[in-house]
Amino acid sequence: MRQVLLITILVVSVAIPVVAQRGGGAQTYDYWAPQREMIRYGQQAIFMCNGLFTSNRTLEQVFAHELKFLPTPVGTVQGGNYVIDRERKAVAIGKPGGPTPVMRAAFREGIGCIILAPNQTLDSIESLPTITTPPPAGNPATIAWPDGDLVSTQPRPAGVDAAKLQAASDWAFNRPSPEQDTLSLLVVHKGRIIHERYADGVDMTTRTRTWSTAKSIASTLIGMLVDQGKLSLDAPLPIDWLPRTTAGVTDPRSAITLRHVLHMSSGLETIDNDGLEYATGSGMSYWAGASSIEGARSRALIREPGTAWDYENYDTILAIYAMKLALGSDAAYHEFPRTALFDKIGMRNTLVSTDRFGDFIFSSQIYTNARDLARLGLLYLNNGVWNGQRLLSQEWVNFVRTPAPATRTRGNQYGGHFWLVPDDRMDVPKDAYATNGNRGQFTMIVPSHDLVIVRRGLDYGRQGFNYWDLTREVIKAIDAPVR
């Protein structure tokens, strides 16, 4: 634990402008280069491990797609300074004794792959957490959509133009930029799948990383606890902040509420932006084995909560830590995503990863497929009701799609961990809202057209796939609003 705390303290101290002018000139030296290399190795360990053992992809596919995000992967398909332990479902990246620590990741039941600390070997695997909640009853292949995967072959609903829908699909897959690599497209209209398409080497069972689409799933679970009265949007977060204040001194961070962190306006120090997202902050827990919870609790307050929008992974982690405290035990915390949400709406293919301490990385690391994300979209399209049972209140659905006050000067583009149609877009219905994750993980919900659209990708480089443009193209195939 002492090593983890030391890492966290280093992380908190880095919010220094890289080009700050002083007497000796601009500070341009990258003091975080060694950590960037460690994180690069850790990224490859997680990508390879999950690609092979969570997504069940081949090594060739992993190098061609999952690792395309990395500028310089270690090794090639033919080999290099990496080890794949298929018996233990683990990966090690790097050369022992080299300047960068060997980084290791291992698959764990019910979780997916977990990154180990630099000083841990694969002999530590059995000490890593697992989640063994039994699966729901029934075979999804014999259960009708959307609770299962059995899809009828009925004609498309009236008012859907097949040619325009195919054109929208081709628009998504046949990208002018090779960096935009669409894996899947799923369109659900009036509750029915009207279009489903996958790239070569991908099918409806293929799990890939959600990146920040995970934040919208986190918001859904938190909303359930708010509905139950176990959390409050406007009460101070029940956080034991680090470092702890002197006895009798009020920590100014106690003014931060759940609403603030879900609006990405906590007022806490910027850690994951300004070129540091793959050097410090949440990157240390995502890719290097540090504690996500300790890092999230260690940021200083630099603005009044609620006044400035700053997209930070740690704001989500703080909300999830509040969820953990509200649930009261590790067992309840680990079971909650499955028992409260996933099993209720048929999200059988979804795994939420943890750090090595068992804390969910609900800001990014969920592995799932297109159909499960469509089910999440349908829950919201149906205003929180599934099979006649209310799982989420109308008030929460309204909250997530209402602009955060701090985004008024930014086009009102963000709500409660969902993305909203910016003020300057006039070609997409204003009632639409979406999940949004790195590398092209999008779920668009369009109530006025009774429509859910899921696009999964493994984009890389500059990326740039525009999910509102895709929404516009799909809507061209729908004759008119339905509500």
Image (cartoon, rainbow, N blue to C red):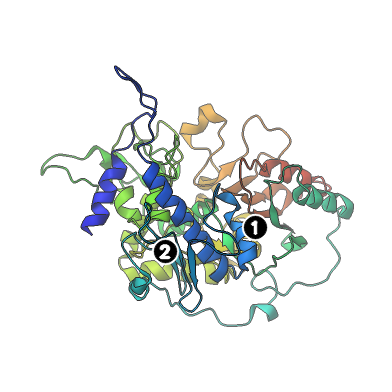
Q: Is residue 240 visible?
A: no
Outermost residue on the bottom side: it is 138
Left or right for 365, reference 229: right
Q: Position of residue 305 (x, y in %)?
A: 35, 35
Q: Is residue 169 visible?
A: yes
Left or right for 219, reference 204: left
- Local packing at callout 2 (Cα closer than 10 Å; few below 14, some 14-19, many 20+) is many
The amino acid pointed to by label 2 is Arg
Label 2 belongs to which residue? 104
Q: Position of residue 87 (x, y in %)?
A: 48, 79
| SS at badge 1 | helix
Q: Is residue 156 above or below residue 238?
A: below
Q: Is residue 89 above or below residue 13?
A: below
Q: Position of residue 97 (x, y in %)?
A: 35, 59
Q: Residue at x 70, y 53 (%)?
A: 182
Label 1 belongs to which residue? 64
